[in-house]
Every structure is written in C-alpha cells, then in structure tokens.
Amino acid sequence: MDAENTNANGTLSPQSIILSLVLGYLGYGISLVIYRLYFSPIATIPGSRLTAATGWYETYLDVFKGGQFTFQIEEWHRQYGSPSCSREKGRLRLEKLTLRAGPIIRITPWEVHIADPDFYEVLFNNKTRYSKIEKLRYRFGLPLSSFDTIDHAHHHLRRSAVSPFFAKQKVAGFSPQMQSMADKMVDRLAIEYSDKVKPVNMNEAYAAFVSDAINYYTFAISYNFIDYPDFVTPFTTSIRKLAMSLHMAGHFPWLLTLLQTLPESVTQILNPLMVPVFRFHNEVKDQIIKIISGQNTSNKGVQHRTVFHELLQSNLPPEELSVERLKHEAASITGAGIDTTKTTLALATFHILDNSSVLKRLREELKTRISHANEAMPPLHELESLPFLNAVVQESLRLAFGITQRLSRLSPDDPITYESYVIPPNVPFSMTSYIQHRDPEIFPEPDVFRPERWLENHKTASGKPLSRYLVPFGKGPRMCLGMNFAMAELYIGLATVFRRLEIELYETGRDAVDMAADYFVPIPKEGTQGVRVMVIGTSV
C-alpha cells in the first residue's frame, strides 16, 4: 500500500477514502449508463441517448424549465420517427415523417412512450389489469386515495365503493341543483357586471361554480364560492397555483410529505400557497369525523345521496374506512375535477366568442329549445341532445386535453407487445392526450377549434368514429371517476351562460387558453390573465 495514502497506524487517510468513494461512484455511474444504453431490456427502443442514460433530464425540463417534458416527448416522436424515402433532383433523400412516424420511443431509462391513437384502447381498456408507477403515489399528498392507489386490485376495491355515486343516472338526479348553481352564477354576472361595468375573469367564475357543485354533491355543504368578490377564493386560487408545484412533488416526493408534517405556522412561511389546501383537508377531516359521530346531518333534507355518508355504510373493510383514508378520498374527489373542468369551460367560452359563426349557431340552437332567456333551462338530457352544443363540448374537451401529463402504467405479469417491440413486465409505458388530440391524421387542422368536425360524419379518414380517439378522461379501469359529473357541468354551464347572457371578449388572446406548460393540467403562457369578458347584458 502506498505510504502517502495511509496514516501512521496503517489505516487509509481521509483523502484516499474520499478519492475511493468518488472513483467508486464514477465507476458505478459509468457502468449504469452503459447498462441502460446497451443492455437494458428496452435498449432497442428508439429515443434520445441522453434521456435513456439519465432520468435527470426529465427533472430538468419539468422542474427547472417549467413543465416542458411533454413537448419534448412530442418532439422526440418526430425526431426518432421512421424515415421515408423521396426523390429530389434524381437523388434519394430521407425525410422524417410526421408525429405518427415514430409511434414508440424511450423517454427515460425505464419508461416507453407510445403515440399511436389506435393503440390507446389496447392499453387502456376495461379488461386490463395494469398498475401505476410507485413514484406517482405522493405527488398530490393523498397516497390513500383511490386515484393514487398503485396496485390494480387494491384500486379496484376502493374505486368500486365510490364509482356508483358518479354513475350517469345519479349525476342526472343531481343536475337540478347543479343548474341552480349555474343560474346563481349567471344572475350575479348579469346584476354585477352588466353594461360593461368591469371585466370578469370567467376562469374564476367557472372555478367557483364547479367547486360549489362538487362540494355540495360530496358533502351536501356549499362553501358559496360563487358569492366571493370577483369569484376569487383562496381555495380555488391555491388549487391552481398548487399545480405549479406538482412536478417538484413528483420528482422529490419527500418535500410534500415534510410540509404536511409541519405545523401550519411553519408551512405558512415555507410555502404559503399550501395553507388553504391543507386547511381544506382539515375541514374535510372534520366533516368525516362529524359524519361518523352523527353530528353531521347535512345529508338529510337534500334530494341526492351524498358520497361519504354512503361510503361509511358500504362493505369496505374497516381499514378502508379510517378517517385518514376517507380524508384522502374526499380531498381527491373534490379537488381533482375543479381545474380540468374550469379550464375546459373557459377554453370553450374563448373559442365560442372568438368565432362569430360558432357563437351565432350555438345561440340559434339554444333559442330553438329555450324561447326566452328567463324561462327555466331544460333538463340535462335535453341539453345533451342538442347537436351543436354537443359538438362544442366535444371540441372543447379535445383542445383542453383533460389531464395533459402522460398516463403511465406498468404490467406486473405480462409483457406488452407493440409491433416488433416487446415491453417487459414492470417496465412503465405511457400515452398522452395532448399528443393524441393533436394528431393531424385523426383531427385535420388539429389546432383549429372546429366543432363542425363532430357533426359531419363523425369519422376519421379511415372510417373510424372520432369519439374513439377523444380521451380527455382516459379509458379503462382508471378512467376519470367524475367524468359524468364534469360533462354535466360543461353542458349546464355553457348552455346557461350563452342562452342568458350577451358577452364579449375583453383583452383576451388565444395565448390565454393554449397550453404553454404541462403541470398535470394545461397551463397557459405566463402573464396571461385568463378568459376575461365584458357582460353586455342579458339575452331576450
């Protein structure tokens, strides 16, 4: 042993220990990269060498560049697409095809992404038994909710208990109360904002509407967010801003866990945006405790059966009915649909007002069913039967995307085969609504808001129905639990606003609704102020 590297007693010096550790770490890192690039079971799947070597590139794009990884995935599908041949001046030239030319790529050292709309329902159908990725469990701080349950069987147990309460028939039974809330929102807009007194941010108005609706449906308690000044509430504001921290929580899950264990006074200093959310979680917990003890009787005297009074009477095992578990379920249900539905309503409002022919056609259709603006709105099933309103809703869902972050799954037991590629068990695979909804072969001129595409023949060039490729709620066993509730909010919200009000855009461009960053939900360009409108007055 070299004397320079040892102490007098024959032990290694601190410098040599540090050097050995550094060299060992470098050796491990190099061998890990070599394994990932050349010996990984997914090494043959095309993609960027950088992202195959390290997962830190995803962290860089999402955490430090601000929700940009989804756009990079889209670019990689183009970049690593299969080449096509064409002749140019007698020479054979290779061209990269469009997005669909590269339907399968490797996006991290351990994950594969597929961009083939026809394969979506192969991966996401009701017969699949796929699990989620473990690292996704803690990004919302609600690991006990059915949404964040990893194992398929455990998820099925939890979801089966709550899904009947969001069945289409039950939601339809609640629709009169939902309509009353939409009426309340529109009445306030007409009284407080008419004659162009001041602009109103429809993102805030819709957030208040959908929040009141889901909270009342869940607990039979309304927080009356619609009554707040300018519809702005600490809770809905925090939900929106909280999205900006989701990537941080996803890549560094211990951060959110740490915040949840700290006293509220400390959290107020470290991350004040979290305080209203944690307070809401505590309020939910208090409501559940009151329900268990019999103190909360808010379900009496209402026309719908509330979710958590019924859950407590379900056949779930006792460990699934703990206060903490139900708190996670409640917070997940009430929080999950607020931002996505609000975003879709606001996007629809912008595009309707930005296109005079769409606005005219929608209003004419609504007037054929609702002769006078002050008469009662028709029931939900009649609104759903209006062809152009339905087309507007479908097109709005297409461009709002629902959840924009890729849906990652893994097959615990069986390999997944795509063309000549085999994805081994326990290797995550994913697909993305943002990419699917903008596929030009399925939706020509994908960035154009054109409801008519849903009225023409409802089919793609290959003869398949367009609805097959519309996936804002996902598909399969983990399809969005609140889909029917969200759809009811869209039909009722848009029909009520555009039949009863005369409104126009105020200093709002398309950058206020186009996705500029992916934070699980679409986030528009920084500095935009939402869809702002002037209320001219009420319709006749």
Image (cartoon, grey):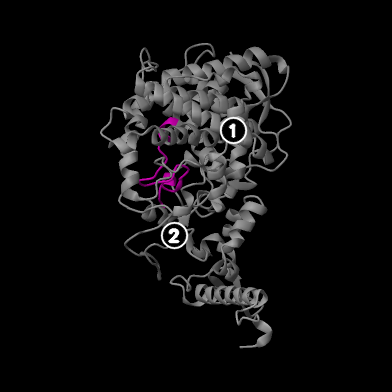
Q: Is residue 405 left or right of residue 177?
A: right
State the SS at label 1.
Answer: helix
Q: Is residue 346 visible to us here?
A: no
Which badge, 1 or 2, comes first in the chain's sequence? 1
Residue at image mark 1: 264
The residues bearing labels 1 and 2 have C-alpha atoms spaced at a distance of 37 Å
Q: x, y percentage for residue 10?
A: 60, 82
Hey, what amino acid is under mark 1? Glu
Q: Which residues are magenta?
A: 463-485
**Amino acid at the residue labelled 2:** Pro
Residue 369 position, x and y percent, is 46, 19
Q: Which mark is on residue 428?
A: 2
How crowded pointer 1 is (Cα within 10 Å; few <14, some 14-19, many 20+) is rated as some
Tell me which residue sits at (41%, 47%) in the image: 468
Image mark count: 2
Q: Quadrant of the C terminus?
A: top right
Query: Is residue 477 covered in magenta?
Result: yes
Residue extending farthest to the left is 315
